[in-house]
Image: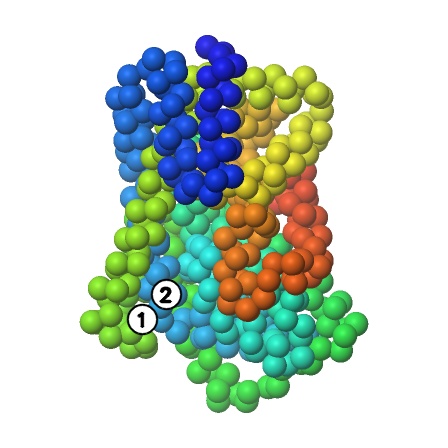
Amino acid sequence: MTDPIAISILLGTFIILILLRTPIAFALGISSILTALYLKLPLLIIAQRMVAGMESISLIAIPFFILAGQIISEGRIAERIVNLASLFVGRIRGGLAMINCVDSMLFGGISGSAVADVSSLGSLMIPAMEKKGYRKDFAIALTVTTAVQAVLIPPSHNMIIYSLASGGTSVGKLFLAGALPGILLGISLMTVSYFLAVKYNFPREEWVGWKKAVQIVIDGFLSIGVAILIMGGILSGIFTASESSAIAVVYSFILTFFVYRDLKLTEFGRVLKNAVITVSMVFLLIATSSAFAWLMTYLGVPRAMAEWLLGISDNKLVILTLMNVILLIIGMVMDMAPAIILCTPVLLPVALSIGVDPVHFGVILMFNLGIGLCTPPVGSALFVGCAVGKAKIEEIFGSLMVCFIPMLFILFVITFFPEIAMWLPNTFMK
C-alpha cells in the first residue's frame, strides 16, 4: 500500500526527533509506533518485527567481534601495530603519515571498528605527528579518514548487519570483497600524504636496528595474527565467518591477558562490561531499525524509490552515481547500523535491477556510510578524533577536505569497476 500521510508521519517524526537530538534508536522506535497507530496496526506487529530483526544466526558474530575489538583496544596492541607499520614505511618521506595509514589498515583488520581505530591509534599518532612538525589539523584528519578502512577490511561487524538486511548475502564473500577496496583506500591516502610530505619537507623515521626490528616483527605479526587467522580460516573453509568471531575472542584474550599481559585478569570484568554496553546499543539499533524498515516496505517506499531512480535514467553509471550521492547524504546524518538496515531494502532492489551483485553493492554501501563516519553532524569517528586531538571540527575542516578527495576517487573507482571488489570472492568462494 502507499499512504502519503503515513509515510510523512514515519519519516517526518524520525527527522524531527533526530533534530531534537533524540537517540537514534528511540527516534526509529517512536516514529514506527506512531505510524503503526495511524495505520491502526497492532503494536504487537512492531514488537514482532523488532524481535525478527535479531533472529538471524549470523548476528551471533557481532557480540564476539565487538568483544575481541574491546580486548584489543584495551591492551597495547595498537602500539605494537604502529611499530610494525613504522618498520615498513617509516623511512619514506613523511614516514609518520605513512605509518598512520598502514597502522589503520592493520588495526582495522583486527578491530573492525572505525571508532576503536581512531581512539586507540589516534592517542598515539596525533601527538607523535605534532611532535615531528606535522600540523595538528592534518594529523587529526588523516587519523579519522584512514579509520574508514576498518569498516571495509575484514572482520567488519557492519558487513554482518548488511548480510542480514540483504536477505542472507554470504558474510564470507562480503569480508573478502571489502579487503581490496580497503587497501586501495589506504594506498590513496598514503599517496596524498607523500606529496604533502615532499611539499612541506616532513621528516623520515630513523632505522631502529636489526635486533629491535626482529622483535617488532614478532610482536607485530602476533598482534595482527587474529586477522590472518580469520581470513585464512574462511579462505580454506576450516570455519565460517561466524565461527571466526569466537576464535577471534579466544586469540585476543590469550594474547592480551597471557602472552603480553597488557591487562590483568581482574580487569576482564570491566572489558566485558564495556563490550556488553556496545553490543546492547548495536542490537537496540538493529531491532528498532528493522521495524522501521518493515514499515517502509509495507508503505511501498522502496518501490517508489526504485521507480524514481529508474525514471531519471536507465544508464547504470548514472543510477550508481545517484545512489552514491544519496548514501553519502544519509551517512552524514545517520549512524551506520541503522543506515545499513534502512537503506538496504530501499536501494538493493534498484541495484539488482541494473545488474549489480549484492556483494558489490554491500561494499559500495559500506564505503559510503564509512565516509559518513568522518563527516558532521553525526560522524562518530570525526568527533572521537577531534576529542583525542583536542581540536574543534571547524579547525580541521580544510585538511579533512584534502583527505576526502582520494576517498571519493576510490569510492567511484570501486563503484564503476566491480571487478576490484569481486575478484577475491569470485576467486576463492565460487
Find residue 253 and report its image quarter.
bottom left
Question: Decide: marks 2, 1 in contact (CB < 8 A)?
Answer: yes
The residue carrying mark 2 is 72
Residue lying farthest to the top in this orientation: 1
> Which disc, if any, is residue 20?
none
Tell me the SS state at disc 2: helix
Frontmost residue, 421 versus 83: 83
Q: Which residue is at a point 53% across and 48% down the rendered structure image? A: 378
Residue that protrudes farthest toward the right in the picture: 199
- Given the image, on which type of amino acid does mark 2 rest? Ile
Q: Quadrant of residue 160?
A: top left
- What x and y, as percent, mark residue 141? 62, 62
Between 28 and 252, the one nearer to me in the picture: 28
Could you give the CA–CA distance between mark 2 and mark 1, rounded to whole angstroms?
7 Å
Residue type marked 1: Thr
* Residue lying at 70% horizontally and 31% vertically, measured from the top left: 317
